[in-house]
Image (cartoon, rainbow, N blue to C red):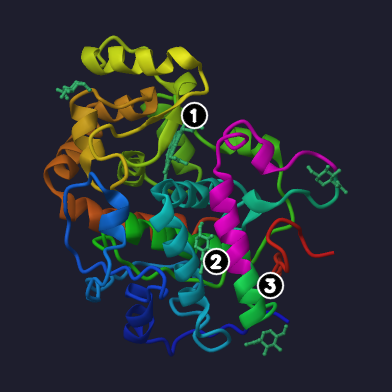
Amino acid sequence: MAATKLAAVVTLLSFLGPVACQGSNSSPICLGGWLRPVKVLNFLLCPPGSSRKPPPGPSPAPSAPSLSVGYYNYACPNAEKIVRDVVENATCNDPGVGAGLIRLFFHDCFVQGCDASVLLKNTSGSSDETEMFGAPNVNSLRQSAFKVIDDAKAALEEACPNNVSCADIVAFAARDASNILSYGKISFAIPAGRYDGRVSLASEANQNLPGPSEDLQQLKASFASKVLDTNDLVTLSGAHTIGLARCMFISNRPGMNATLAIELSQKCSSGDSTRVNQDYKTPDVLDSQYYQNVNDNDVLFDSDAALSSAETQPLVNTFAKNLKEWEKEFADAMVKMGNIGVKTSANGEIRKTCSIYNS
Ligand code: HEM
Ligand SMILES: *[C@@H]1O[C@H](CO)[C@@H](O)[C@H](O)[C@H]1NC(C)=O
Ligand SMILES: *[C@@H]1O[C@H](CO)[C@@H](O)[C@H](O)[C@H]1NC(C)=O
Ligand SMILES: *[C@@H]1O[C@H](CO)[C@@H](O)[C@H](O)[C@H]1NC(C)=O
Ligand SMILES: *[C@@H]1O[C@H](CO)[C@@H](O)[C@H](O)[C@H]1NC(C)=O
């Protein structure tokens, strides 16, 4: 029943070819590395009849011993294409879905490892609430992102039943969302072969996910506990260049851009649960604008502003100036995050339905 472990014979080319530009007929996307101004995102993401150029090649990154690139090439050759099509369709309709998918991957990996525990509605052996009901997740992770995973899983169960883990779907979807929201500039192969967990606890989500009012020492400790270093923290925080945040998390720090602070307090007058763009300049583009925002004091959370600390300021400056450098580092850091606490057939399973562990 377990997906066969297919180590080596994987060609990056045969993998990247289809994944790079396999638009569904309804939404051809072609991301050849061009970047444009942002205003009309849907049009730019899904230009009618755009030509299909391959993206730049992947940057090799170390993978956990049990994972490999192209893991499903033999047992389910279309697995990554099937995920890509679902992500592409949903993200073209609403770039927020892509933001939701990237965050879903982070919230999965930091709690019980990258094992799709964040998708479970019940945990094995108790009736306690699962991760998705924890404070960082409830009313926060996007339902539209869960739906992408469920839709992809349904298609995969048709194509190759019992073979593709939900944990790998989450990882593929985050990778594809990164590619789409960066207009193809962030393009990387992500190793797969993760198994799904059976344990999911809200209390563990509360403990393991860093909060928006944390300072640099706390953030570093949180990442270090997942074997991610300070550079990974700085690099991955750049994901706050897309998506939304609720007003309740916005910091009151005196240094914040006063004009922005006034605009935010006006928007937030309709309540603490109002959602605002994290990056008011290029809200739906996965770019390095976040680092300029850190320098301009235009970021929303204390945890973002914390990156102006002496220790992290140099890397923030590098990324603010050098988009390409950040894109490359972000891809590597996503792969590294995807190695956290990976489960194997010995302590995991290939779930049949992503929200329910196998009986
Ligand atoms: C460094 C520590 C981090 C903290 C304290 C933090 C905190 C938060 C908070 C409070 C929100 C808003 C949630 C809401 O209003 O419901 C948010 C949104 C978001 N975060 Fe983070 N985050 C961190 C790191 C990351 C990382 C590593 C990633 C991904 C690589 C990420 C991706 C996102 C995305 C994409 C959103 C917007 C989601 C959406 O619009 O659906 N964050 N984060
Ligand atoms: C998937 O897993 C099953 C066992 O559940 C196995 O028999 C089959 O060969 C695998 N591959 C495909 C493509 O279904
Ligand atoms: C594409 O997305 C739309 C809207 O979210 C949905 O109604 C449609 O069924 C999707 N099509 C495919 C082929 O996934
Ligand atoms: C499973 O989770 C649902 C939703 O959280 C809950 O209503 C139900 O009681 C749980 N079932 C079991 C067997 O724990
Ligand atoms: C401060 O915020 C305002 C309003 O959002 C913006 O126009 C301005 O460019 C910001 N200043 C800096 C230095 O980023």
Q: Which residue is mark 1?
A: 211
Q: Amino acid at mark 2?
A: Asp
Are the residues tagged 1 and 3 within 8 Å (C-beta)?
no
Residue 13 counted in the magenta span: no
| Circle number at residue 345 | 3
Q: Amino acid at mark 1?
A: Gly
In the rendered image, residue 6, in percent from the top left (x then y), is placed at 53, 85
In the image, is 151 to the left or to the right of 36? right
In the rendered image, residue 223, in percent from the top left (x then y), is placed at 45, 41
Q: Label 2: how many residues lie within 10 Å, few (<14), some (14-19) or many (20+)?
A: many
In the rendered image, residue 319, in percent from the top left (x then y), is placed at 18, 44
Q: Amino acid at mark 3?
A: Ser
Q: Which residues are magenta?
A: 127-153
What is the distance, in whole Å, between disc 1 and disc 3 at their CAs? 32 Å
What is the distance, in whole Å, between disc 1 and disc 2 at their CAs? 26 Å
Q: Which residue is mark 2?
A: 168
**Front position among marks 1 and 3:** 1
Q: Secondary structure at mark 2?
A: helix
